[in-house]
Amino acid sequence: VSQPSGGRAPGRRIYSWSCPTLMSPEEKLDPIPDSFILQPPVFHPVVPYVTTIFGGLHAGKMVMLQAVVPLDAHRFQVDFQCGCSLCPRPDIAFHFNPRFHTTKPHVICNTLHGGRWQREARWPHLALQKGSSFLILFLFGNEEVKVSVNGQHFLHFRYRLPLSHVDTLGIFGDILVEAVGFLNINPFVEGSREYPAGHEVPCSQALPQGLWPGQVIIVRALVLQEPKHFTLSLRDQASRAPVTLRASFTDRTLAWISPWGQKKLISAPFLFYPQRFFEVLLLCQEGGLKLALNGQGLGATSVNQQALEQLRELRISGSVQLYCVHS
């Protein structure tokens, strides 16, 4: 059973399905045509790494993963998930899990549905080696996903859940990720960039009934090129803000700010970067709010339940472009 482990010039290489070329650690990714880009690539993310796939997955999209296998690696996994909830665990339409700790390294592929793993599929002769860099391309077709490793076709896996349900990518385990890219197979098929329409800030959204246990606030946005801060505040009818979450780019801190201006730092890696997408999730529970950033839980802040019920406005400001605000 599978177990979780934890611009402008045309691109010259690594974007072709048939013959990508690996980069050495000191090289940088070549620029790629706008017509190929679905959302900006991510460089050297911290693992575990969870990100939204804007527009979700459908036939004709490709995800590129360039990384290094550590010398002491046991396993890593790449999950194409149906959501990023913390509990219950989201369905995983395609679970790609290379394992190195056995005498015969191999890859396990599977689907997690309703909290249960389905029948796993095993592929031997894993073309990845400890201490080596690699390039994996995930090519999504109408009925199956094809996977190439270092330019060679390695496996195909037939979908068991609808591809349209997938909107999140998760990378976990023993892996040093250099780059993740979201590309079109053929720029002449789907046309130009597939960015969703962005909204300017500041932005305000009404909370007519306040917040109650079980209610979720989701904010998805893109950090601008020269950011200063990102601020999310929850305000009552008197415009007081019992809850404020602020990311400061000057000192690279994430903190809760009290109504009196006191700062309570959140102990976590600073995951906001220029020209990168992020997702903030706030889950209301009795006596407070739980926080998750890019699918990773970052603890909670205590708020009196009466104060939560009296909230009437969600306000967002700062150096971001909004793509989704849900409450």
Image (cartoon, grey):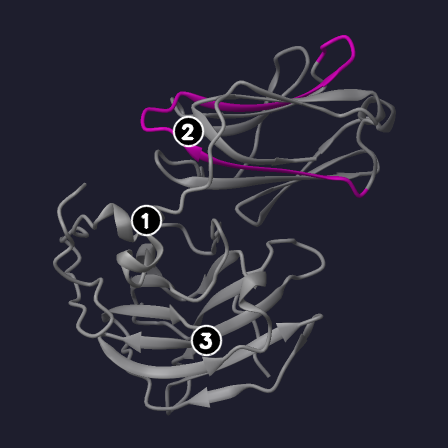
Q: In the displayed structure, would residue 102 be above or below residue 113? A: below
Between 166 and 25, the one lying in front of the other is 166
Q: Amino acid at mark 1?
A: Pro
Residue lying at the far right of the rendered structure:
306
Residue to which mark 3 is pinned: 97
Q: Quadrant of the N terminus?
A: bottom right
Q: Secondary structure at mark 2?
A: loop
Q: Residue at x 37, y 24 (%)?
A: 227
Q: Residue at x 23, y 71 (%)?
A: 132
Residues packed near mark 2 inside 10 Å, few (<14), some (14 to 19) or many (20 plus): some
> Dot 1: few (<14), some (14–19), or many (≥20) neighbours within 10 Å?
some
Secondary structure at badge 1 equals: strand
Q: What amino acid does circle 3 point to?
A: Asn
Judge depth for marks 2 and 1 and give the one in front. Answer: 1
Picture disc at residue 252: 2
Region rendered in magenta:
214-240
Which numbered circle lies on residue 201?
Answer: none
Q: Residue at x 28, y 62 (%)?
A: 186
The residue indicated by pointer 1 is: 41
**In x, y percent, where is residue 16?**
21, 67
Callouts 2 and 3 close, C-beta under 8 Å: no
Residue at 87%, 24% (x, y): give it.
306
